[in-house]
Image: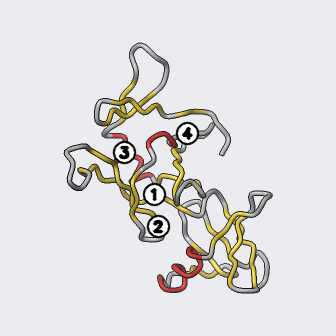
Amino acid sequence: MDNFDIRIDKEGLWYYKGAHMFRKEILNIFFDHLRIDECGKYLIELGPECCYVDVEDTAFVVVAVYKTKKSGDSRDQIEILLNDDSCEILEMNSLLTESTNVLYCRVKKGRFTARFSRKSYYQLAEYIEQSENEPGFFISLNGEKYFIQSNKAI
């Protein structure tokens, strides 16, 4: 694999030498072998080969948001569906916006940052409240307030 022949745009779409990559079984292999090096660059490691990936924003994109109940519990949780077709519980303390007001969170046990798509942002926005006493926005879940951090670098 040649370096930077693979690109991921800000919507999470993958390209190889400019051609859209859409075969899920290939993308799943790439997602499974995706890493970030010590300089913060994305790369795919397949055995002895590695290929750096040009990532416009983040490799992972949140494509859907669901409020569900924890199994065997009456407590609410928010699940997110990612562009690799995996579903995970949203890490509520990882929500942040940066200078362009795009919403992000940490995924894959905190190893990666994911960008919320427009659709998933509006789905999550149903639960976002503005604080009257404190500056900022938060999500109230199970009696706790989770504030969205702002203006922080990713």
User: What secondary structure is marked by label 3?
Assistant: helix
Query: What percent of the width, then of the height, locates residue 41?
Result: 75, 62
Pointer 2: what residue?
Answer: 83
For the point 39% across and 15% down, which residue is it?
132
Name the residue type under label 2: Asn
Left or right: residue 17 compared with residue 138: right
Up/down of 1 relative to 44, above or below = below
User: What secondary structure is marked by label 2?
Assistant: loop
Pointer 1: what residue?
Answer: 62
Q: Residues within 10 Å of mark 3 (few under 14, many from 20)?
A: some
Query: What percent of the width, then of the height, locates residue 152?
Result: 64, 36
Query: What percent of the width, then of the height, locates residue 1?
Result: 75, 86
Mark toward the start of the polypeptide (2 vs 4): 2
Determine contact: label 1, label 2, CB under 8 Å.
Answer: yes
Determine contact: label 4, label 3, CB under 8 Å.
Answer: no
Q: Residues within 10 Å of mark 2 (few under 14, many from 20)?
A: many
For the point 56% across and 82% down, which residue is it?
29
Q: How far apart are the two marked residues, 1 and 4, measured between alpha carbons?
A: 14 Å
Left or right: residue 56 compared with residue 103: right
For the point 78% across and 83% down, which residue is it?
2
In this rendered view, identify the residue nearer to me: 109 or 128: 109
Dividing the picture into quadrants, the one containing residue 131 is top left
Name the residue type under label 4: Thr
Q: How far apart are the two marked residues, 3 and 1, measured between alpha carbons?
A: 10 Å
Q: How is the image coloured?
A: secondary structure
In this rendered view, identify the residue nearer to me: 128 or 20: 128
Pointer 3: what residue?
Answer: 124
